[in-house]
Amino acid sequence: MNRFVVCLLEDCLEDQYLLKSKLSNSQKHLFRVQCFTTIASLANSINLLEPDVLVADLNLPDSQGLDTLIKIKGIAKNIPIVVLTGSDEDIAIKVIQLGAQDYLRKDELSTELITRTLLFSRERHLLQAALEEQAIRDKLTQLYNREAFDEQFANKYENYVRYQQKFALIFIDLDNFKPINDEYGHTVGDRILQLVAARLRMFNRVTDTIARIGGDEFVILAPNIDNHDDLTLFINAKKQKLCGVYALESAKGTLLELKVSMSFGGAVMGIDGEDKKTLFDKADSKMYIAKRDEKSS
């Protein structure tokens, strides 16, 4: 049998019993239902339970009406929500507009309906999450795209303003990439970008954010780097992992071994700038200085 964890936010014990008994009658699925009577109690446990779906009444001791949905969305991130309602169709429509996956009327509960609603809500939620993930990925490299980078940059900056959490911004630009495209074609150039992206992912810290923001330009947001010494160590480590010979197949099916070098430029929030634009310009400028020095050497 398929197993599903359900969080039920409902302060009425009779309604708790009714929904649990209906789900226990399912012949194909085994539902483990964990009940909560307040938003506060749910918030303390939801991350530990990792439920497949959250079923919630909107009228609780610590919250009433549509505000309840807004509050639980804040603590039940990435979890599909099904709202228990009365017979008010207007409320039912509004909960969908506010982000719930579906709703169940308390006067129409049956094992078949509840089971179908919970399963379909989870599937729709997973599909929606997959589509949203694709929307923020660069199609060629599957790294974050420019839009996603801008959002992550804004989040990091907000944490800096609130909590003075410094972070580093590092630009990476491939050297002499245009000649590679001109000599071997864009298929080979695209493959180089994919291989560089693969190495970036492979040698990435879990806390770092990597994005492709231009043709051959990559960027890293690196938290927990709060001084230039650590930034230099970080950049040198990336150089060792990323620069070197890449083996790939040409358009004619022959082996190509191409030496790829890159220029890096980094800046630390709180040291090199106090706002996003200053930090961005500083890291970008350092990267172009490194590129100029590379050409003259």
Image (cartoon, rainbow, N blue to C red):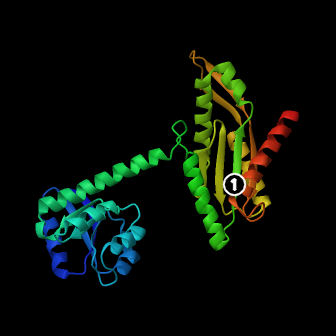
Q: Residue furthest front?
A: 90
Counting from the top left corner in percent of width and height, residue 275 is at: 71, 62
Give, as a three-letter code, the residue at label 1. Answer: Leu
Task: Provide residue 15's location: percent of width, then percent of height.
Answer: 17, 76
Residue at the spot 68% in from the left edge and 41% down from the top edge: 242
- Residue 94: which quarter of the image? bottom left
Tell me the residue at 88%/34% (across/down): 296
Query: Compared with residue 53, is residue 120 higher up or lower down, i.e. above or below?
Result: above
Location of residue 30 by image quarter = bottom left
Residue 297 visible in image? no
Q: Give the secondary structure at mark 1.
A: strand
Q: How many marks?
A: 1
Residue at screen point 19% across, 76% down: 16
Instruction: Tell which of 4 and 175 is nearer to you.
Output: 175
Is 28 displayed left or right of 170 in the figure?
left
**Residue beneath the point at 75% across and 45% down:** 264
Give the position of the N terminus as an image quadrant: bottom left
Q: Residue furthest bottom?
A: 61
Q: Where residue 79 appears, x then y in whole percent?
A: 36, 62
Relative placement, left or right, of 239 versus 156 is right
* The residue positioned farthest toward the top in the image shown: 252
| 253, above or below 95, in the image | above
Q: Position of residue 183 (x, y in %)?
A: 69, 19
Q: Is residue 185 visible?
A: yes
> Which residue matches tag 1?
169
Q: Is residue 261 above or below residue 79?
A: above
For the C terminus, which image quadrant?
top right
Q: Nearer the viewer, residue 59 or 32?
A: 59
Please rate how many residues cluster around mark 1, counting C-alpha atoms within 10 Å: few if below 14, some from 14 to 19, many from 20: many
On screen, residue 87 versus residue 195, left or right, reads left
